Structure formats: C-alpha cells, structure tokens
Amino acid sequence: MSNLKYQRVLLKLSGEALANDQGFGIDPDKAANLAETVKQVYDLGVEVVVVIGAGNLWRGSVGVERGMERTTADHMGMIATVMNALALQDALERAGVVTRVQTAIAMHAIAEPYIRLRATRHLEKDRVVIIGGGTGNPYFTTDTAGALRAVEVEADVLIKATKVDAVYDADPMKNPDAKRYEQLSYIDVLQKQLKVMDSTAISLCMENNLPIGVLNLWEAGNVVRFVQGEKVGTMVSAAPTRYAEDA
C-alpha cells in the first residue's frame, strides 16, 4: 500500500453510472463494468465507500414540477438509491468483493442501517461499503450525502466520478475555447457556481478540508491512477485555482 496516496476513499456515483445507453434503468453490463472499476481500486488495498444516486430511476424534480409534494418526491429518490446500491452489491459480490449495503432509511430485510462505527469496522475488515438512502432527509442531494459520509468515516478524499474528464470554465462541447482546471479552490467553485457538486456539499468539504477529485469514471484506469497520486481530472481543495496549462 506504500504506492497509494489515498488509503480510504469515498466514491460518489450518479445513478446514470448504472443506466442503459438511454440513461434509464439498470444495465447489468454497466453494473459489471462499474464493479470491475471498484474492484481494481479495492485490490490495491484501498478502503472504499460508495455513495450512489438515483437519476437513472427517479428524479424528484420531475414529480415536483407536476405538483408532487417535495418530501414525497425526495423519499422516492432515496428508495431508488437503495435499488442501485443492491445492483452494485450484486455485481461486486459476483466479482469476488465482499460488500455491505447500508442505508439511512430503515430497510432491515435488505440492508443494514447506516451507523458510522459499523461502516468503519467493515472498511477495516476489507469490505466495500455501499451507502444508499442519501442522508435520510428530504431537501438534501446525494452529493451532500457523499460529502457527509466521507467526513464521518474520515475518508482521505471524495472522488466525484462523472462522464467528463475534468471541470472546465465553460461547456467544452459548446465552447472549443473552454479551459480545463487542474486545481480549483472551494471558494472559486462556489463563487463561479461551477457544476462540481451542490453548494451544500462543497461547503461541507471546505469546512472539513476534505479534497474532492473530479474525474471521468469510464476512462480505463482513471480511478486507480488517481488513488496512486497521478494528476487525473480536477482537484478541488483549499489550494489556489489554476488552469491545466498553468501547471
């Protein structure tokens, strides 16, 4: 483990990481690919916590736009994250990785309740911990849940795994002159309203000096290279902001 920069990581995934090519549902092949990525990091000796969203199954904003009460819509989303957690657990177990699913919403028949000390004990016993149910409260995103759980289990870094290779100052698909950030300060993320994570999550990380790595989940070897200390994607921390070409 001496070649590792990070010994304990929290991997924040969107529900779309499990979705089919149309962005919906749970694709078993995507689940298997995602499990292989997690396994590669786990096999290095890294302690891994996963927090997963539910955008592939349900978006509360859709219900709210049609008159649904916000708390109900958010609770539905929390339940959907547990479905994704179980799908990832199944894929990881079939790949030979021992896992535990925990959830902030009581579902004793299918998952453990989230208890911080129990989660850390699982990590110490070489189990991947998959956390569903968000924070257990409406009005909070799974980004905030990821930041909260990362702080609670004393993770070395929060890895925000996305479909893009880094954070840019503009949409690179629309603006060919968009500049890629290598390093971003928490304050700049908040002030520039960059779409890294929601402001509550960023603020929580800033208050606890928890670095955030933003990288492309689907580029082979990216997460492994990141935990080994290579420069991958964009790092958000207390350090000053700089563009990639300024490094």
Image: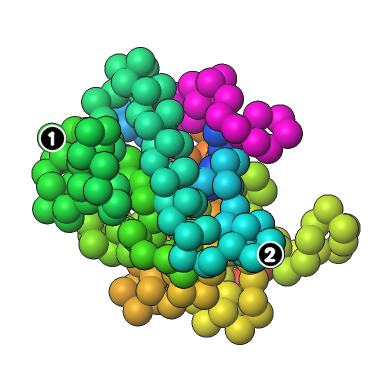
Q: How crowded is mark 1: few (under 14 residues within 10 Å), some or many (20 or more)?
A: few
Question: What residue is at 35 percent from the left and 15 percent from the top?
Answer: 94
Horizontal side, residue 160 vs residue 152: left or right: right
In the rendered image, residue 17 lying in the magenta stretch gets the answer: no
Secondary structure under the numbered disc 2 in the rendered image: helix
Secondary structure at badge 1 equals loop
Q: In this view, does 187 lie to the left or right of 114?
A: right
- Residue at image position (35%, 79%) is 207
Mark 2 / mark 1, whichever is N-terminal: 2
What's the mark number on residue 125? 1
Does residue 169 appear in this view?
A: yes
The quadrant where residue 88 appears:
top left
Quadrant where the image shows the N terminus = top left
In the rendering, which numbered label is found on residue 70?
none
Type of the residue with mark 2: Glu
- Mark 2, Cα crowd under 10 Å, few <14 / some 14-19 / many 20+, is few
Image point (66%, 57%), residue name: 62
Asked if labels 1 and 2 touch by Cβ distance under 8 angstroms, the answer is no
Q: How many marks overall?
A: 2
Pinpoint residue 229: horizontal percent, then vertical percent.
42, 48
Q: On screen, 150 above or below 139? A: above
Which corner quadrant of the image does residue 176 belong to?
bottom right
- Range shown magenta: 19-39
> What whole-number distance in Å separates the C-alpha atoms at marks 2 and 1?
44 Å
Label 2 or label 1, whichever lies nearer to me, is 2
Q: Which residue type does callout 1 highlight?
A: Lys
**Res 45 visible:** no
Q: Is residue 29 magenta?
A: yes
Q: Give the labeled residue for mark 2.
A: 65
Please determine whether, in this image, residue 204 is positioned above or below residue 89.
below
Please tell me which residue lies in front, 105 or 167: 105
x, y (%) of residue 50?
37, 44
